Image: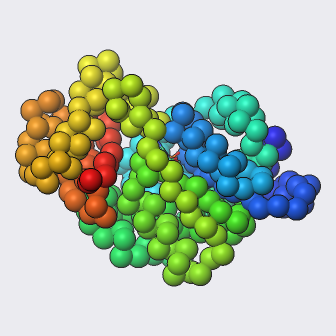
Amino acid sequence: MKIARTIEELDACKSALGNGTLAYVPTMGALHEGHLSLVRLAKEKGDYVAVSIFVNPTQFAPHEDFDSYPRIENEDAKSLEAEGVDILFLPTEDIMYPDGKDSDIKAGSAAKGLETTFRPHFFDGVVNIVNRLFNAVKPDLAVFGEKDFQQLQVIKQMVEVLELPIDVIGAPIIRDKSGLALSSRNLYLSEDELVTSRKLNVVLREAARTSDTEAAEKALLDYGFDKIDYVAMRWNRVLGAAWLGETRLIDNVAVR
Ligand code: AMP
């Protein structure tokens, strides 16, 4: 696995690859089996795989967890090497935002509501960085998790509107044995919070069966969640975001 920290190094790594398609998985690191499942899908779909780790400052509001977001670069690099990744791109802020952090593009209509109601800055930050990363990596296809279902829709829309020649592929949510969707932010949870967190998917599945999102919000509070941002139906899914202490969890399930 070659490591690139600048655009020039990335270009050199790409030139050293033979002919074939490049599949790309953007991440913010603290990798778990969810991320690795994306890498495996990327390997299946492309001839070569590039992964980036960049904790993107523009998608965090000032009061959010940018500073405390888990950063375990060496461990992550080992996991990716073991998966047979070809290129690991590890840019810094100066590389991704040489012009400062102004948003150059805006997220489209898929960003309306849900996450945006509670994190208004979020999707503009996401499309801004993903577009810049796409420009740097120039992949043929890119894999994103359905765990962040609204994000997947926003990225698909961005690629369509900008007419980027990139196939965006959604990958299924990876869960632990209890059904809890894996997330880097699960590392923040205490033992007690972990127990409660495992109810999120149970409640969303019930809401997918009954379509009663109000009852789902009440059930989450009863189970011990501290605050519910939303439980809502869209794209034939039930999507939810809820807080345990300082930790915000999101998840979604398909309506059958
Ligand atoms: P992040 O590092 O949180 O920005 O996530 C990077 C990518 O991994 C995104 O496309 C996420 O949707 C995806 N991802 C995160 N957790 C999971 C999971 N449990 N299952 C599938 N994909 C995931």
**Residue at (55, 74) in percent of width and height:** 159
Nearer-the-camera pick, 180 or 221:
180
177 on left or right of 33: left
Residue 239 relative to residue 19: left or right: left
Residue 254 seen:
yes
Residue 52 visible to the viewer: no
Residue at (78, 54) in percent of width and height: 47
Viewer-proximal residue among 173 and 58: 173
Residue 214 location, x and y as percent?
A: 9, 51
Residue 251 lies in quadrant: top left
Residue 136 versus residue 202: which sits nearer the camera? 202
Name above or below for residue 227 compared with residue 169.
above
Q: Is residue 163 above or below residue 142?
A: below
58 sits to left or right of 41: left
Colouring convention used in this rendered image of the protein: rainbow
Q: Quadrant of the N terminus?
A: top right
The residue under the point 90% across, 57% down is 18
Compared with residue 107, is residue 198 higher up or lower down, i.e. above or below? above
> For residue 106, what is the image quadrant?
bottom left
Foreground of the two, 130 or 95: 130
Residue 243 at x, y = what percent? 25, 39
Q: For the view shown, which residue lies furthest in the top direction? A: 191
Q: How many marks?
A: 0
Residue displayed at 12% across by 49% down: 210
Q: Position of residue 168 (x, y in %)?
A: 56, 64
